[in-house]
Amino acid sequence: MTIQRMDNVAIVVEDLDAAVAFFTELGMELEGRAQIEGLTADRTVGLDGVRSDIAMMRTPDGHGRLELTKYHAPAAIGATPHDPPPNTPGLHRVMFAVDDIEDVVARLRTHGAELVGELAQYENSYRLCYVRGPEGIIVALAEQLN
């Protein structure tokens, strides 16, 4: 076997508190926060003088995690364009299964989220949408229909 599991997905953000609040509203749980710096961090990420804060967010089932990272040093380099469309190469989106998609979208809007397209239905199986959250992160939501 080459891997045991997918441990987490890391997302670099400018406003760590806003990102934590957004993903908490989505239903994730804050597992912990830490400051990361030193030679091991420098060697791991290939940068010199790394100093960052991280927040590890966990899905309610305990199997999925997001590592939200705020770099203090070296300064983060902004992506162009700021809000890339969903077909931009690279990390596309993070998807979550939800119970009530309209309720989740309404709650995320209080944290600045906006629909990328619209709430759509796929056959008789799912209601789906993309929302753009903090830092332009695209979060896909899927509500399975009975």
Image (cartoon, rainbow, N blue to C red):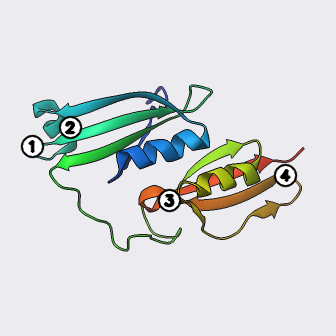
Q: Which residue is mark 4?
A: 125
Q: Amino acid at mark 3?
A: His
Which corner quadrant of the image does residue 89 belong to? bottom left
**Closer to the camera in the image, 72 or 142:** 72
**Closer to the camera in the image, 130 or 2:** 130
Question: Spatial distance from mark 3 to mark 4, Cα to Cα?
Answer: 23 Å
Q: Which residue is mark 3?
A: 92
* Residue 135 placement (x, y as % from top left): 41, 59
Q: Name the mark nearer the viewer: 1 or 2.
A: 1
Secondary structure under the numbered disc 1 in the rendered image = loop
Question: Spatial distance from mark 2 to mark 4, Cα to Cα?
Answer: 42 Å
Q: Between disc 3 and disc 4, whose residue precedes?
A: 3
> Which quarter of the figure is the C terminus placed in?
top right
Residue positioned 68% across, 49% down in the render:
104
Q: Which residue is mark 2?
A: 44
Q: Residues within 10 Å of mark 4 (few under 14, many from 20)?
A: few
Secondary structure under the numbered disc 4 in the rendered image = loop
Question: Spatial distance from mark 3 to mark 2, Cα to Cα?
Answer: 24 Å
Residue positioned 36% across, 45% down in the render:
16
Mark number displayed over residue 49: 1
